Amino acid sequence: MTNLIAPSILAADFGSFAAEVRRADEAGGDWIHCDVMDGHFVPNITFGPDTIRGIRSATKKPLDVHLMIERPERYVERFIEAGADHVIVHVEHEAKHDVAWTLQLIRGHSRKAGLAFNPATPVERVLPFLGEVDEMLVMTVNPGFGGQAFIPEVLPKIRELRKRAPQLPIIVDGGINPTTGRQCAEAGANVFVAGNSLFRHKAAGLKAAIEELRKHVTH
Ligand code: DX5
Ligand code: ZN
């Protein structure tokens, strides 16, 4: 299965978003990961569909839009209309939606439907949806902020998912760097979201950082 690197623009310079997105694109990012936070599902606020539209105009790479929001079904169509290729929603009760219905809504618009779950959420919560998703996102930190330390206790959940779904893209998100990325790859993950470990490198450094991460997760 192809390994993909998805730079998370949460760690980019918000004062020059379009330039940062182009930088991630030109440096070799495979997808551009966009974290949407509403101040309810997580204790932080980022941006909404209009910003996704701006990001869309700066790159042709697939945009994966990670919705850390309550009632995501209310906004799915606006994010798709703004240019999202992948829409990822959370399984937790706190997201306050009918998960199967929202996944169907996303797929009904011919977009990839992803399901995310937090470090404290057992893998059993997402297993019933395996047949209804195009990808799974395993949170490897508690959602809300970039720059947190990877939580190794999530590794068995990745192994279990990979065992149950040999062909399904498994995304890992949070605290991913060459060391933790390799651990996740060995457990079965194949899409690596990384914010701080990539963006803290300046200009030419971003390309080198993506290549370094790619090298470590390829086995
Ligand atoms: C955390 C977000 C992540 C975040 C990862 O809530 O979902 O996508 O950008 O950032 P790093 O790689 O810095 O942990
Ligand atoms: Zn994310």
Image: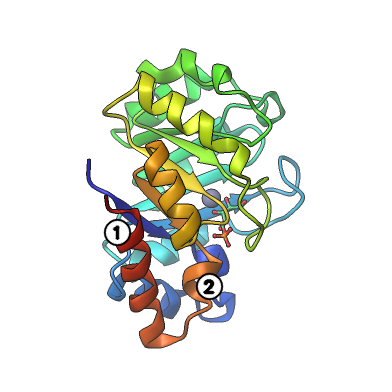
Q: Is the residue marked by circle 2 packed among few (<14), some (14-19), or many (20+) residues within 10 Å?
A: many
Which amino acid type is marked by label 2?
Ala
Image-based side of 97 in relation to 108, left or right: right
Above or below, 171 against 133 in this view is: below
Q: Residue 199 carries which label?
A: none
Q: Quadrant of residue 87?
A: top left
Q: Where is residue 63 in the image (x, y as percent from the top left)?
A: 37, 54
User: Which circle's residue, 2 or 1, is located before the other in the chain?
Assistant: 2
Q: Where is residue 200 in the image (x, y as percent from the top left)?
A: 53, 77
Residue at 56% over, 52% down: 174
Q: Where is residue 211 in the image (x, y as percent from the top left)?
A: 31, 69
Above or below, 128 against 103 in this view is: above
**Furthest-left residue in this view:** 1
Mark 1: secondary structure:
loop
Whether residue 23 appears in this view of the structure is: no
Whether residue 104 appears in this view of the structure is: yes
Image-based side of 202 in relation to 163, left or right: right
Residue corresponding to mark 1 = 30
Mark 2: secondary structure:
loop
Above or below, 213 against 202 in this view is: above
Q: Looking at the image, do the residues carrying marks 2 and 1 touch, with CB atoms under 8 Å apart?
A: no
Residue corresponding to mark 2 = 12
Q: In which quarter of the image is residue 25?
A: bottom left
Q: Is the residue marked by circle 1 packed among few (<14), some (14-19), or many (20+) residues within 10 Å?
A: many
Residue at 64% over, 50% down: 37
Residue 67 or residue 109, whichever sits in front: 67
Q: In which quarter of the image is residue 160?
A: top left
Residue at 34% over, 54% down: 217
Which amino acid type is marked by label 1?
Asp
**Furthest-top residue in this view:** 128
